[in-house]
Image (tube, coloured by chain):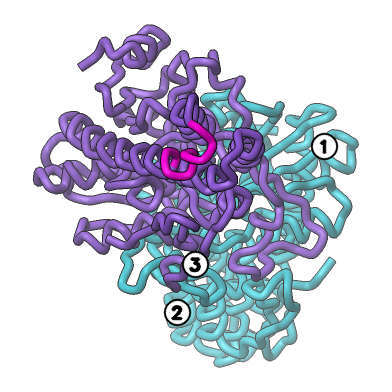
Chain colours: A purple, B cyan
Amino acid sequence: MIKHIIWKKNSLRVLDQRLLPRRVAYIDCRTAEQVARAIKDMVLRGAPLIGCSAAYGMALAARKRSTTALQAAARVLVASRPTAVNLAHAVDAMFRAAAGTPPQRLPAVLARAAEAYFRSDLDYNRRMGILGARLIRKGSRVITHCNAGALATSGIGTALGVIRESFRQGKIAHVYADETRPYLQGSRLTLWELMGEGIPCTLITDSMAAHLMKVSRIDAVIVGSDRIAANGDVCNKIGTYGLAIAARHHKVPFYAVAPTSTIDPATPDGSRIPIEERSAAEVLEISGIPIAPKGARARHFGFDVTPARLVTAIVTEKGVVRPVNASGIAKILAGMVR
Amino acid sequence: MIKHIIWKKNSLRVLDQRLLPRRVAYIDCRTAEQVARAIKDMVLRGAPLIGCSAAYGMALAARKRSTTALQAAARVLVASRPTAVNLAHAVDAMFRAAAGTPPQRLPAVLARAAEAYFRSDLDYNRRMGILGARLIRKGSRVITHCNAGALATSGIGTALGVIRESFRQGKIAHVYADETRPYLQGSRLTLWELMGEGIPCTLITDSMAAHLMKVSRIDAVIVGSDRIAANGDVCNKIGTYGLAIAARHHKVPFYAVAPTSTIDPATPDGSRIPIEERSAAEVLEISGIPIAPKGARARHFGFDVTPARLVTAIVTEKGVVRPVNASGIAKILAGMVR
């Protein structure tokens, strides 16, 4: 599997996912600010992966051997993208590691903590894959949206982790990947991952998913998440909500897969999740080619929220929340579900 | 307004809509086969407009002064795209005009009949605009999908005809145009038409419509149609069905606007409408640039079917069908609704 972030002690080498699948190129980030810029510009993306990168960003800032520098780095990293809560989660983990550490030992301690954070995400991926595969029956044809795969995480992915493990168990007949406008993570990244492992897959435009559910048997929709509220509302890449409505209309189970670091108990429900609005240019152009008249206006919502009632189950590394509601979320966070 | 088809007696000059909004260029079709090729290649599109073009295609074939030539032309024109029933409707109208006409008079008679067919579509557009505007209340914010505008018809358009007339009456506050992957008729054509007339409009990706219905007030969804079955099922550009499900979920009225030539009483319901599958390359590339890995597979459904129960009303030139069901459709076809 291709390496998408490589820790170099004095820098974090980051695969530029914007160029995939056409070109494999890396960017070296030597400071937390450069990591934050790479996240903001979507050089790398995916809630768990940007969490891991923020941890390494803090490790880079630690080389200044000052808590002021760490605090400044934390601010710029958390602000790099407003929706994914994993950034704050990772930064908090780094502060816990830094607590009581003499300044001269900060670089080594935070580098180790960032490595541990990365490794735990890797382990969570594996566990979610195994727990999620239990929900998938043999011969399943599934739809996924955006890229919640290896490129979005430290390991096998969240949604794609479940698909990979289910495929390994002989349960996946076919994967349909939404192209995921405007950034085309589905066509550029998900297809690339699935084809690389010989998992049978077909690209569709986002607008074809509902039709496909009607004319073809679809057994499950499996997606990742950028933030899950305390009541189980699932925030994910724009288009997920419409897909969930279509799934419910066709009685197709809708699964969200995310580590508990994606759950934000401080956000009571989805209406309180800040939805990033990105540049209109990203909708008005494709690969730099204008697709709309000069002077056209566009909205570019980066995410949407799928209410808990449309989510059949949430798969975390600690267990499966089902039914999805506030008490189920509270139990998972308390480690009360297995 | 730009001319999109120009009858030249010996040829039909056709605006190449694939190049809009970047370039205005025309293609001259001298035979029915060339018209059919232009329709197949989407040089021009939109159910009413390809109907008009097929009529002119028959007029070009009539220059051979033989019914055999007309029959051959009809076959190739009707086969150029399988979903829109307007092609067959137009060809039938030309055969009616040809009936009993001496061969030497066929060119003049069919040219006149094609002009009349075009003019009647123009008139229908105006009537649908007026009837449809009655359904729209002041200050409306509407979503439209694909391009059902001047570029898709002879006149002001079907869905966009209603939007234009409603705007003229001061009822439209804002239009959100789905970009409409994979052909981007929304971003390339609809925005171009709306901006040209100063109608406030914003582009969204198809995947943003459901989110917009949740976070913003949307008063109506207005679309065209490529074929309406006898029971009121509405076939239209891929993505319409998902949009209709989302509209129902949010209790937003969903209107289809189409001349009665789009209604096919011989098709009992939507499951019998042939859904054109086009080249996967049109999904795997944008403007010739690959957006997926080499060797990737894709499906490209050109259309989908929205069941009658999700359609609030169908606006035709003869009146409004509401509720949408077999008896309403039968009454409209019998001219029993005003």
Disc 3 to disc 2, C-alpha distance: 52 Å
Disc 1 to disc 2, C-alpha distance: 45 Å
Mark 2 or mark 1, which is nearer the start of the sequence? 2
Is residue B64 visible to us here? yes
Please name the residue shown 47% across and 37% down the image.
Answer: A240
Q: Position of residue A209 (x, y in %)?
A: 40, 45
Q: Secondary structure at mark 1?
A: strand
Q: Secondary structure at mark 2?
A: helix
Please name the residue shown 54% across and 43% down the image.
Answer: A62
**Quadrant in which the N terminus of chain A is drawn:** bottom left
- Camera-side residue: B274 or B181? B181
Q: Position of residue B268 (x, y in %)?
A: 38, 42
Which circle marks residue A19 in the picture? 3
Kind of residue at badge 1? Ile
Q: Secondary structure at mark 3?
A: helix
Q: Are marks 1 and 2 on the same chain?
A: yes
Q: Which residue is mark 2?
A: B71
Kind of residue at badge 3? Leu
Q: Which residue is mark 1?
A: B172
Q: Residues within 10 Å of mark 1 (few under 14, many from 20)?
A: many
**Residue A105 falls inside the magenta stretch:** yes
Disc 1 to disc 3, C-alpha distance: 41 Å
Question: The disc numbered 3 marks a residue on which chain?
Answer: A
Question: The disc numbered 1 marks a residue on which chain?
Answer: B
Residue farthest along the top direction in this orientation: A327
Span shown in magenta = A102-110
